[in-house]
Amino acid sequence: MLLLSGSVGGEGAVGGGSAAGGEIAFSSSRGANWDIYVMDANGSGVRRLTRNPAEDDRPAWSADGRKIAFVSGRAGDGIYLMKADGSGLRRLLRDAAFPAWSPDGKEIAFLSDRGGNYDIYVMGANGGSVRDLTRNPAGYQAIGRPAWSPDGSKLAFDRGRLHGGDEHIYLMNADGSGQRELTRTAGTSRDLAWSPRGGAIAYASDLRGNFDIYLLTLDGHFVRRLTSRQAEDTAPTWSPDGRRIAFSRGSSVTAIYVMNADGSGQRKLMNAATNPAWQPAARPRR
């Protein structure tokens, strides 16, 4: 059940500016198969972290920025874990995708059909204590990656009907209780990313025909469209300071772009790249 993007083409950094702002992990097929890479926030300093014939995709940083979880097709589909330099690789769980690390670093939420229907689950950061959170009602299933609120009290996710129909954003408590619908617009809403301060959720929607990046503010549920190109814009990820959003643009040929949080200043960071994940701000050791 590995959930990946299409193939990408081209290579090389295009953006410029300061490397300040941490690193961005991403997936690329520039090495003939999909692997996980990291780059500086300005598109420079590209480093390859995985080298495997299987497809590696959907990187997710730990809250302290020292580890990366990702989806891989090696030895059966599942979630794998490695240090930020690519060392210490090990599998956490089979039949799982779209990992999302809790802000306290103790749990990882993910998507799985291990119960016969796609649901959002959570497990301990070491792969144990797996629990089904959504237990979707008959006729419904979770679709894509979950997103934690910055305080760890809630999870946002997208849910749709089993046999077609619109996919909407839902919100629930971290234990799976209190599920409620946030969006009622037509089309598909997916690839959720909670802003660092918790006031908004960036996501991809095909409300206007092709996928664009939208912003949903939780205070008043105001929705704003941030991109409006004739291209598929998906997989938004926030900079640690909440001022910028990186995202994927394209379908068969994909690149990573970055823009200001209001949608202005859009520019390309990297060709042959998709599904970016911005490294969280460094936190002191305890």
Image (cartoon, rainbow, N blue to C red):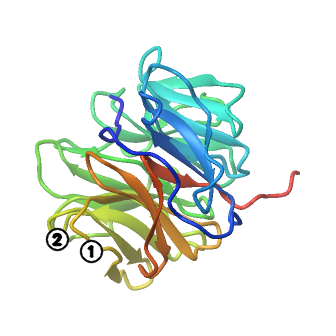
Residue 169 in sight in this render: yes
* Image location (x, y in percent) of residue 135: 34, 41
Q: Which is nearer the eye, 97 or 210?
A: 210
Task: Give yes or no for contact between labels 1 and 2 (Cβ–Cβ under 8 Å).
Answer: yes
Residue 99 in sight in this render: no
Q: Which is nearer the eye, 144 or 50?
A: 50
The image's mark for residue 208 is: 2
Q: Residue at x 51, y 50 (%)?
A: 175
Q: Residue at x 56, y 28 (%)?
A: 80
Q: Residues within 10 Å of mark 2 (few under 14, many from 20)?
A: few
- For badge 2, the amino acid type reads Arg
Image vertical order of residue 198 relative to residue 129, above or below: below
Mark 1 vs mark 2: which is more N-terminal? 2
Q: Please, what secondary structure does the residue beneath circle 1 have?
A: loop
* Image location (x, y in percent) of residue 138: 19, 41
Outermost residue, right side: 286
| 47 to the left or right of 34 | right
Q: Residue at x 21, y 67 (%)?
A: 230
* Image location (x, y in percent) of residue 164: 11, 48
* Quadrant position of the N terminus in the picture: top left
Report how far apart the C-alphas of labels 1 and 2 lie in the structure.
9 Å
Disc 1: which residue: 228
| 262 to the left or right of 139 | right
